[in-house]
Image (cartoon, grey):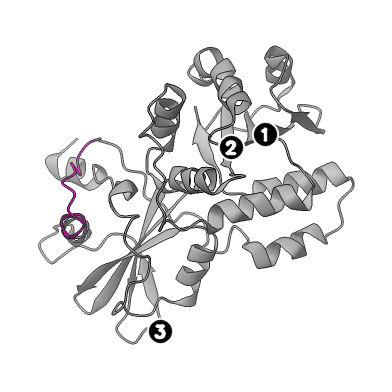
């Protein structure tokens, strides 16, 4: 890989350095409505500054970053990285300046992988106001309606994104959640047998804040595993973090009167939706029952 490509694909934004600052500080320009909708879905939004007549914003949602630039008239915006006339990444400099402003010295080239987001529409995942529309649709069975609602939740991915997957609601301090993930961690998740789409929730102020933090950081799997391994600093409680993403997840649980974690839903190879309440007793059966992922 060339030095330029390495720099381009090596950009990584560590949200933990920035989430303590307000999402929309006094003096920041107004955000376009689609970006405000992202905040409503739980995204952490930070203003990068003005460059070449464009107001830059970074959004972090489900541990992944998106970059936006709003035109001077506020009537349009672009999504992606900004380059200067010499081909240098202006966005990188803006992120560095924002980090320095927050008093954190971080290595922006910590990895050689960068997965630019933006392949999906900003409206691809419904907000709370759209959830009622989704639940009012006609479904063949209540379980299909439940599955549809859960697909719209804010989740983080553990394991191979191409592996067969389950959806699991977890509370960061739930001991049964810890045991359930650890049951799968070495033999199934690490080996690419299963992907866990983990939906963080919180039943107390502290755990809601930890769940929101988990949705914000760029390496949520690493943070979660450190938390499971006993690192008490892995999921800090940050008062100013946007918790709307977690509230959205909780609203799905509440609408279905689910009050236990872990709570797992998956689609079987037969096409049926299966539900597991609590820590699964027979993981091998779930693994063999999972619907394969289309390649």
Between disc 3 and disc 1, the foreground one is 1
Pinpoint residue 163: horizontal percent, then vertical percent. Answer: 57, 27
SS at mark 2 in the image: loop
Residue in the foreground of this view, choosing between 238 and 218: 238
How many C-alpha atoms fall within 10 Å of the one at disc 1: few (<14), some, or many (≥20)? Answer: many
Residue wearing tag 2:
171
- Indicate which disc, 1 or 2, sits on the residue closer to the N terminus: 2
Any mark on residue 75, and which?
Answer: 3
Q: Is residue 107 magenta?
A: yes
Q: Is residue 166 above or below residue 279?
A: below
Segment tinted magenta in the rendering: 99-110
Q: Are marks 3 and 1 in contact (CB under 8 Å)?
A: no
Any mark on residue 140, and which?
Answer: none
Residue 65 lies left or right of residue 11; in this view the side is: right
User: In terms of secondary structure, what is the magenta stretch mainly?
Assistant: loop
Residue in the foreground of this view, choosing between 28 and 65: 28
Quarter occupied by the C terminus: top right
Mark 1 to mark 2: distance in Å? 7 Å
Q: Is residue 109 above or below residue 29?
A: above
Q: Is residue 167 above or below residue 215?
A: above
- Indicate which disc, 3 or 1, sits on the residue closer to the N terminus: 3
Residue at x-position 56% and y-position 42%: 200
Residue at x-position 24% and y-position 46%: 11
Q: Quadrant of residue 41?
A: bottom right
Residue at x-position 40% and y-position 76%: 31
Residue wearing tag 1:
261
- Indicate which disc, 2 or 3, sits on the residue closer to the N terminus: 3
Pinpoint residue 291: horizontal percent, then vertical percent. Answer: 71, 28
Residue in the foreground of this view, choosing between 142 and 106: 106
Q: Are marks 1 and 2 in contact (CB under 8 Å)?
A: yes
């Amino acid at each position: 890989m060339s030095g330029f490509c390495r720099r381009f694909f090596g950009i990584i934004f560590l949200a933990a350095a920035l989430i303590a600052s307000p999402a929309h500080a006094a003096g920041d320009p107004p955000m376009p409505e689609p970006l405000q909708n992202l905040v409503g879905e739980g995204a952490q939004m930070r203003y990068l500054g003005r460059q070449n007549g464009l107001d830059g914003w970074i959004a972090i949602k489900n541990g992944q970053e998106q970059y936006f630039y709003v035109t001077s008239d506020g009537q349009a915006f672009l999504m992606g990285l900004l380059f200067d006339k010499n081909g240098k990444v202006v966005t990188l400099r803006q992120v560095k300046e924002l980090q320095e402003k927050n008093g954190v010295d971080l290595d922006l080239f910590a990895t050689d992988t960068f997965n630019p987001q933006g392949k999906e529409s900003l409206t691809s995942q419904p907000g709370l106001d759209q959830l009622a529309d989704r639940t009012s649709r006609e479904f063949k069975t209540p379980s299909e309606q439940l599955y549809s609602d859960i697909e719209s939740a804010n989740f983080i991915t553990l394991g191979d994104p191409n592996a067969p997957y389950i959806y699991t609601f977890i509370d960061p301090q739930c001991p049964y959640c810890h045991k359930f993930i650890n049951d799968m961690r070495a033999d199934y998740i690490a080996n690419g047998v299963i992907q866990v789409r983990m939906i963080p929730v919180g039943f107390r102020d502290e755990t809601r804040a930890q769940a929101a933090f988990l949705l914000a950081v760029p390496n949520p799997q690493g943070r979660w595993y450190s938390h499971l391994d006993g690192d008490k600093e892995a999921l800090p409680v940050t008062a100013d973090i946007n918790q709307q993403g977690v509230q959205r997840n909780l609203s799905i649980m509440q609408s279905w009167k689910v009050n236990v974690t872990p709570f797992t839903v998956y689609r079987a190879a037969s096409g049926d939706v299966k539900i597991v309440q609590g820590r699964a007793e027979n993981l091998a059966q779930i693994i063999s029952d999972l619907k394969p992922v289309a390649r």
